[in-house]
Amino acid sequence: MKLYPEILTLFFAISLSLISAGQTGEVSASLSNTPPPGFAALWNGRDLTGWWGADTEDPRGYTGLPAVEFQTKRDASLTDIRKHWLVRDGELVNDGKGLFLTTEQYFGDFELLVDYKTVPLADSGIYLRGCPQVQIWDSTDKKKFAIGADKGSGGLWNNSPGAPGKDPLVKADKPFAQWNRLRIVMVGSRVWVWLNGQPTVDGSVLENYFDRKLPVPSRGPIQLQTHGGEISWRNVFIREIGGDEANRLLRGTDPEGFSSIFNGRDLTGWTGQLDCVNVTGSAIVWQPGKGGVIHTQKEYADFVVRLEFKLPPGGNNGLAIRYPGSGNPANEAMCECQVLDDHYEQATGSKIDPRQAHGSAYGMVAALRGYQRPAGEWNYQEVAVSGSTIKVELNGTRILDADLSQVTEFMEGYGHPGRNRKSGYFGFAGHNDPVAFRNISIKPLD
């Protein structure tokens, strides 16, 4: 089942600034290095200001360095960069050797436009947040047909064999000596790519080449990777994507099988401690100082739920998964999927167990942190429940993938007897904070 539908129409509707001459193909000389509205030039067209050199290395290794240590690493790379990179006739040119040109600035969600031109046998790519890569190579090189060169450029070549996005959807490379245009959108770990106006990747997850058990970092640099032959670049533009737009892009239009379980006006279809919440601004909003559980009147076994939530600083709530209708969801339901401000400890001064962090199966399995938007902004989340497994994707990044039947260690010794439940209600477990939920839809899988 594909949770992320074809949303190319939505992208084009949002990015009206791109519907101009040259944005999907050849760019006229008069527009060279002039960013379209809303974009900024990553390369200034004159020199290498704002760039340094890195290799194929885990970006978490240098993005977390103290400022002095990073500056030393950066400065040491510039000798190699100056040897293999130059500006020629308004183009950024690499000789096919040396370190990869790397932005000093880091990016989260973004839209990137890049023009490139290469030569036979060259092999290149664009690292996203420091992770490989959107592939660029010689699609006529028969020696590399066995590894996919014949399928063309624009795929996520470093994804696992057979994984979505590894091979481009179409072959869209232009002949040598002609300029190609890449358009790349990245939200969370998900990537969309167009090469010369044709879609080559449709919302696929970019795997973390350095540790496939972890998602790619939430922020990191853009890198222009080169080896094997000369490649020229120009018109390198970027636009950072805000949270509201990112949520729209991730959600798209609910695919077939999903139905809304909250009408945005009242609590029709819900039951429980309804006096704990108000419906305000098309959202279910908890009243400050009131706790309690509200849940659907319908039961679900296996399902996927899509929703948006907004937290105040230190805000705490939870998703009741297969809730029996009474008791504490953390123990009596299959689980309480925690909804908690990522900066809860700083906001409240209280320390939490990792199994209490946002997205965790409360008290049983810890979710990854660092992928939540700041307090006060809307987040988009999908939760998939199948058998004894639960998967949580937050803002386009998988933060939990757990089989609760395999859990043997529990926070504070609670056994969580409800974790073996096969069905139950879906709901929210409020904890006195004005947490808000909206755009809630669900798809039964059984």
Image (spheres, rainbow, N blue to C red):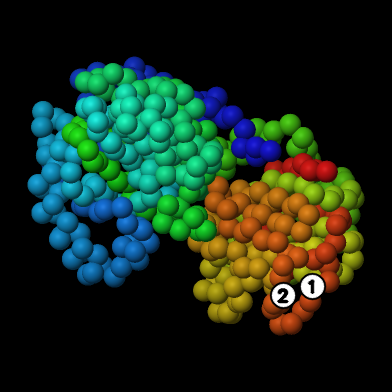
Q: Picture coordinates of residue 130 (x, y %)?
A: 35, 51
Front residue of this view, candidates 299 and 98: 98
Q: How many marks?
A: 2
Q: Residues within 10 Å of mark 1 (few under 14, many from 20)?
A: many
Q: Nearer the viewer, residue 168 or 195?
A: 168
Q: Is residue 223 above or below residue 392?
A: above
Q: In which quadrant of the rendered image does the C terminus lie?
A: top right
Relative to 398, residue 186 above or below: above
Residue 324, percent from left and from top:
89, 61
Q: Pointers 2 and 1 in contact (CB under 8 A)?
A: no
- Which of the two discs, 2 and 1, labels the residue nearer the N terminus? 2
Q: Quadrant of residue 431?
A: bottom right
Residue occupying image coordinates x 38% and y 50%: 131
The quarter of the picture where residue 405 lies is bottom right
Q: Which residue is mark 1?
A: 416
Q: Position of residue 123 (x, y in %)?
A: 28, 36
Question: How would you rate the neighbour count of disc 2 (Cα within 10 Å): few for under 14, some for 14-19, many for 20 or more?
Answer: few
Q: Nearer the viewer, residue 126 or 236?
A: 126
Residue 177 in view of the camera: yes
- Three-letter amino acid code at the position of disc 2: Thr
* Left or right: where 176 falls relative to 48: right
Secondary structure type for disc 2: loop
Q: Residue at x 76, y 52 (%)?
A: 386
Q: Which residue is mark 2?
A: 408
Residue 263 found in image quarter = top right
Amino acid at pointer 1: His
Looking at the picture, tell me which residue is in the foreground, 232 or 377. 232
Q: For marks 2 and 1, give the one nearer the viewer.
A: 2
Q: CA distance from mark 2 to mark 1?
A: 10 Å
Residue drawn at 54 percent across, 51 percent down? 397
